[in-house]
Image (cartoon, helix red, strand yellow):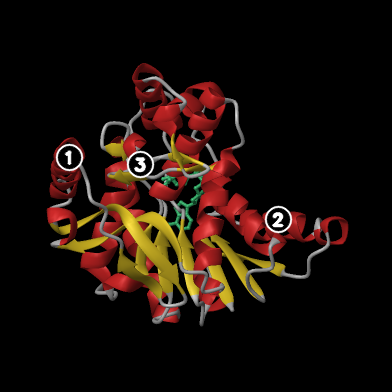
Amino acid sequence: MKITVVGAGAVGATTADNIIRRELAEEVVLLDIKEGVSEGKSLDMYQTAALLGFNTKPIGSTNDYEKTKGSDVVVITSGLPRKPGMTREELIGINAGIVKSVTENLLKYSPKAIVIVVSNPMDTMTYMAFKESGIPKKRLIGMGGALDSARFKTYLALAMDVSPLDIHGMVIGGHGDTTMIPLTRLATYNGMPVSRFLSSEKLEKVAADTMVGGATLTKLIGTSAWYAPGAAVMMLVESIVRNQKRVVPCSVYLNGEYGQKDICMGVPVVLGRNGWEKIISLRLSDAEKAAFEKSAEAVRAMNGALNL
Ligand code: NAI
């Protein structure tokens, strides 16, 4: 198994670090445009092998795509992150150019790879990668819902003072502060609806905190987060390479599912060795359906800015 991560910044390096620690592949390539950065970070990471006990050796590459040749999974994290006060959508112009050229280069050397898009605005970047590259839809996955769901579970666990491991919950829709949909109605604590433990006001607050979860961190840190994003990407990669068939909300190309066509948005999918295998159709309430429709309108407006 060979995995490439493009972008050796905060999210890309954390992703690669998580992947090598779990030995998800024999080869992990970390590529960045900045001279020496990916080589330096790879060496730094490999120096933890003797301390933490793993065998996967990361390989750094300054923009040399030859080294990525034959990758089974490629992760695209290259691009600008947001600064305090910025929305993910404001990154569109610059990141579109970066994601387009990176996708082309990756597919040239790894035409059969499963592609995971992380760069923001993620749903639009995933849609653009689909339109521009012609990659089969099941091999293209946008990461957003996995992270947003982890944040949702964390806020639920904090509100209930329980372990996040005992919470099940999902965030679907677009990966934006106003477009994501935390499904509070379907969230459970050890199989019991969380509404048994939290008042509707508290649940509304959890949903609101989840939606601005990224912005809250950006304000605190001064740039966007990386620990949970890196772990979320690793979780997708793990389900793919180990063929775990986990159900995770991911941004995928919809062709009528959830009432939407020709758009990439977050819906629960089964992730296995060949990419996303199928979309899980949740029975949404009328209010949730309306929220999904509204979310799709916002994602579509963003896609429109690219004139695809
Ligand atoms: P960062 O600035 O720390 O790292 C980005 C890296 O990309 C830099 O090292 C830069 O040199 C590199 N890069 C830029 N152009 C490149 C190119 N053409 N080829 C190769 N490398 C190139 O940013 P960070 O925090 O790692 O975020 C990366 C992206 O991921 C941002 O767009 C951010 O908004 C997004 N993000 C998405 C999340 C999600 O849930 N989908 C979560 C967190 C971040």
* Residue visible at 41% across and 77% down in the picture: 274
Residue 180 x/y as whole percent: 30, 38
Label pair 1/2, CB-CB below 8 angstroms: no
| Amino acid beneath label 2 | Gly
In the rendered image, residue 298, in percent from the top left (x then y), is placed at 17, 40
Q: Nearer the viewer, mark 1 or mark 2?
A: 1
In the picture, the quarter occupied by the N terminus is bottom right
Residue at the image position 71 percent from the left and 60 percent from the top: 21
Q: Earlier in the sequence, mark 1 or mark 3?
A: 3
Q: Report how far apart the C-alphas of labels 1 and 3 lie in the structure.
A: 24 Å
Q: Are marks 1 and 3 in contact (CB under 8 Å)?
A: no
Under 8 Å from ligand 1: the CB of mark 3? Answer: no
Which residue is label 3 attached to?
A: 186
Measure the alpha-carbon separation of dots 3 and 2.
44 Å
Image location (x, y in percent) of residue 265? 26, 52
Q: Which mark is residue 40?
A: 2
**Residue 298 - label:** 1
| Left or right of residue 126, residue 44 in this image | right
Element class at badge 2? helix
Q: Specify whether residue 36 is in view.
A: no
| Image height of 203 relative to 261, above or below | above
Residue at 56%, 73% in the rendered image = 242
Which label lies toward us, 1 or 3? 3
Q: Nearer the viewer, residue 12 or 234?
A: 234
